[in-house]
Image (cartoon, helix red, strand yellow):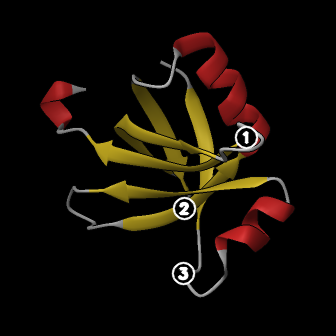
Amino acid sequence: MNELLANKRDINVKAKKVRKIGKLPGILYGGKRGNVAFQINLNEFQKYIARKGEHGNLIINIEGEKINTKIISVQRDLATNQIINVDLKELPEEAA
């Protein structure tokens, strides 16, 4: 598995603004930290999807904390087929 860098995202900032600066908004569900809104580099995520597919395991590094996750949903724009949002589920420590 590859590791992708992510940052926590302010939920008051619209996802459209996040996408305009080349980031992909997403939500990390579950785990001891609850649900976390994050943003990740769109190009890096697209490269990962091209290699590994849209439904697999992924390690994300949110502000120095490595988290094992599973991709549960990749949302795309219907007109452009561009990725507009990603939903991840945190995996338990023993499943990673």
Which residue is denoted by mark 2 in the rendering? 38
Q: Nearer the viewer, residue 33 or 51?
A: 51
* Residue 57 to residue 24: above or below: above
Q: Nearer the viewer, residue 92 or 73?
A: 73
* Residue 45 to residue 90: above or below: above
Name the residue: 39% across, 55% down: 28
Q: Residues within 10 Å of mark 2 (few under 14, many from 20)?
A: many
The Cα atoms of the two marked residues, 3 and 2, are separated by 9 Å
Q: Position of residue 58 (x, y in %)?
A: 45, 30
Instruction: Give the mark nearer the N terminus: 3 vs 2.
Output: 3
Q: Residues within 10 Å of mark 1 (few under 14, many from 20)?
A: few
- The image quadrant of residue 39 is bottom right
Q: Position of residue 56 (x, y in %)?
A: 39, 22
Name the residue: 78% across, 41% down: 80
Which residue is denoted by mark 3 in the rendering? 11
Name the residue: 73% across, 40% down: 82
Q: Are marks 1 and 2 in contact (CB under 8 Å)?
A: no
The amino acid type of the residue labelled 3 equals Ile
Residue 62 horizontal side relative to residue 13, left or right: left
Residue 82: which numbered mark, if any?
1
> Between tags 1 and 3, which lies in front?
1
Residue 24: which numbered mark, if any?
none
Q: Position of residue 50 (x, y in %)?
A: 65, 16
The amino acid type of the residue labelled 2 equals Phe
